[in-house]
Image (cartoon, rainbow, N blue to C red):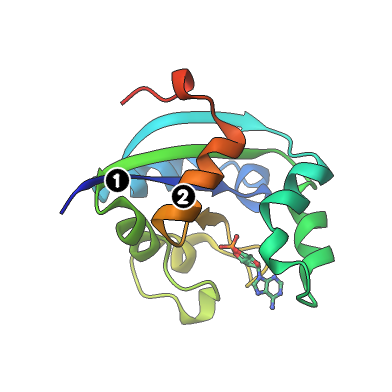
């Protein structure tokens, strides 16, 4: 399988509980390499752009409010089949359905406050990475 890059966010419920290191340990244990990382506060504009695909969903307002409620850590992860691999490591969106050993099973609080985001496909990974990182900030 090809070496890929995916985009990750450690969400405000993770920074609030000071568990970003614990989550990074699970990411690295899975064989993914953190090739870019920064802690930021998303603006409302950034969050609305990032989640534009969910604009018509009933939870959109709640989702945006949550994502700007505290710091987040944005990351680029690299590895073999990184997009699918990270989705496996994260576990199901709803933590009550997440498999044992996944980040969301171990750490997520609810379907909304679910600790991590990961890109769902190669094209979205490219767009999401470009929203938060310039090329020279990614060091593989
Ligand atoms: P994420 O992978 O960041 O992509 C979209 C997010 O919407 C998802 O994780 C969840 O955190 C959030 N989400 C999905 N369904 C719901 C819901 N029913 N209520 C609140 N948030 C949701």
Note whether 6 is above or below 53 in the view shown: above
Query: Secondary structure under badge 2?
Result: helix
Asked whether mark 1 lies closer than 8 Å to ligand 1, one says no
Residue 4: which disc? 1
Residue 138, x across and y down, in percent: 42, 25
| The C terminus: image quadrant | top left
Query: Secondary structure under badge 1?
Result: strand
For mark 2, what is the residue? 125
Residue 49: which disc? none
Note whether 94 is above or below 118 in the view shown: below
Name the residue rendered at 57%, 56% in the picture.
Answer: 115
Residue 64 figure quarter: bottom right
Q: Is residue 137 left or right of residue 131?
A: left
**Mark 2: few, some, or many residues within 10 Å (few <14, many ≥20)?**
many
Q: Which quarter holds ligand 1?
A: bottom right
Q: CA distance from mark 2 to mark 1?
A: 9 Å
Query: Would residue 132 be visible to someone looking at this image?
Result: yes
Residue 79 figure quarter: top left
Residue 92, x across and y down, in percent: 46, 73
**Mark 1: few, some, or many residues within 10 Å (few <14, many ≥20)?**
some
Residue 16, x across and y down, in percent: 68, 45
Name the residue rendered at 15%, 54% in the picture.
Answer: 1
The reply to whether the C-beta atoms of the residues labelled 2 and 1 are less than 8 Å apart is yes
């Amino acid at each position: 399988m090809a070496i890929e890059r995916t985009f990750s966010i450690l969400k405000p419920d993770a920074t609030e509980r000071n568990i970003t290191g614990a989550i990074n340990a699970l990411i690295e244990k899975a064989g993914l390499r953190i090739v870019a990382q920064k802690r930021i506060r998303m603006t409302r504009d950034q969050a609305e752009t990032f989640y534009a695909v969910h604009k018509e969903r009933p939870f959109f307002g709640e989702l945006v409010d949550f994502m700007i409620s505290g710091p987040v850590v944005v990351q680029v992860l690299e590895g073999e089949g990184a997009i699918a691999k990270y989705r496996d490591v994260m576990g199901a969106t709803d933590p009550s359905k997440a498999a044992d050993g996944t980040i969301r099973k171990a750490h997520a609080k609810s379907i909304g406050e679910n600790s991590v985001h990961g890109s769902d496909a190669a094209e979205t990974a490219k767009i999401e990475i470009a929203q938060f990182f310039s090329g020279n900030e990614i060091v593989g």
